[in-house]
Image: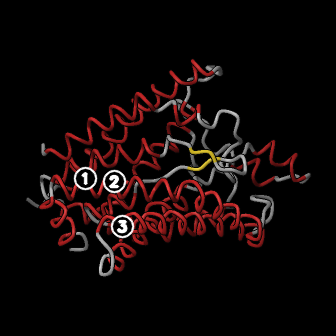
Amino acid sequence: MDRLTKTFLVIIGVMIILSPIGILLVWNYGDAWGEWDPGDLAGQVHEKLTGMEKLSNAWTHALLPDYNVPGWEDKLHASIGYIISAVVGVALVLGAYYGLVKLVGSSS
Amino acid sequence: MHIPDGYLGPYTCVLFYIVMIPFWYRGIKWLKNLHPRQVPLLGVLTAFSFLVMMYNLPVPDGTTAHIVGGTIIAILIGPWAATVSISIVLLIQALFFGDGGITTYAANAFNMAVVLPFVGYYTYRLLRKKLSDVAAAGIGAYVALVTAAIVAGFEFGLQPYIQPGYCPYTFWVSVPAMAFAHLVTAGPAAAVVTATVLWYVKKSQPELFSMGEAEALRG
């Protein structure tokens, strides 16, 4: 493993620990544009969005929805949930990546 | 910029899956070109991309935005590598964290895994004729993120014309909103992060920097 990869591993570790910044900094902010709850949005525009209601439930099996353990609402619990999500996410991303690399096979 | 399930109708979603097939095919095939020492580097960069997207940044209009990290991968390893790596990140985010969507996965991949790294890469290539590598990378990341956000804005905003009942806002609303969030907050952050990473790589491992360039588009 070269030096750059090692440096990035350290950065990844630090970013996991500091990840709650990503929610605490925007605690009283709304969602990103276009990422609102369909029910809230329908109320906002006074329109029945039938297609959206149906499709928005296309996938309801997220393990850690919104990068949190369901029910961990206060700042402390949400921060812990966020760190757990960061660890799980990094592990899943690396697993998927190495799985794909193995499947494709490197030329050398 | 993750379009959730429900915001795009079935026709739009299917269209983007069709559009993405050749990009995914070529990107996955490109992985064979990875030098053995690039394999772990692309791995950590993929994890890095997942993490930078967790850092939501405050936008003055009360919303949030985040960076993607796609330009860094495009410059250090290649735009096709970025297509694969960001697509992996988006899939994990959709499946396990409910961020983005399953029906909208291909549209999100088009914006963040194709438009973003390719715009970033070519902007960087163009600018480095006149500017330093570090400045070119920073500006490239800025232009790439804002462009991807505007493209996402058009997808939101064209939906009411294609099929009503999904995203209710037309592009007169969605494009300025998406552009604003990324012009003022996430864009500058992407520029600083990308320029810093490139400065560090150039300083510590210049040989890796040039390897990425020569092989970035091969295959």
Question: Measured from the top left, where is residue A43 in percent x and y?
Answer: 88, 46
Residues tagged by mark 1 and mark 2 found on one chain of the structure: yes
Q: Earlier in the sequence, mark 3 or mark 1?
A: 3
As measured in the structure, the alpha-carbon distance from the residue carrying label 3 to the one carrying label 1 is 13 Å
Residue type beneath disc 2: Thr
Callout 3 secondary element:
helix
Is there CB contact under 8 Å for labels 1 and 2? yes
Q: Which residue: 46% across, 33% down? A: A19
As measured in the structure, the alpha-carbon distance from the residue carrying label 1 to the one carrying label 2 is 6 Å
Q: Earlier in the sequence, mark 2 or mark 3?
A: 3
User: Relative to B91, is A69 above or below?
Assistant: above
Q: Which residue: 25% across, 52% down? A: B200
Looking at the image, which is closer to me, B197 or B155?
B197
Question: Measured from the top left, where is residue B145 in percent x and y?
Answer: 50, 62
Residue type beneath disc 1: Tyr
User: Relative to B22, is B166 above or below?
Assistant: above
Residue on which the image places disc 1? B200
Looking at the image, which is closer to me, B173 or B109?
B173
Callout 1 secondary element:
helix
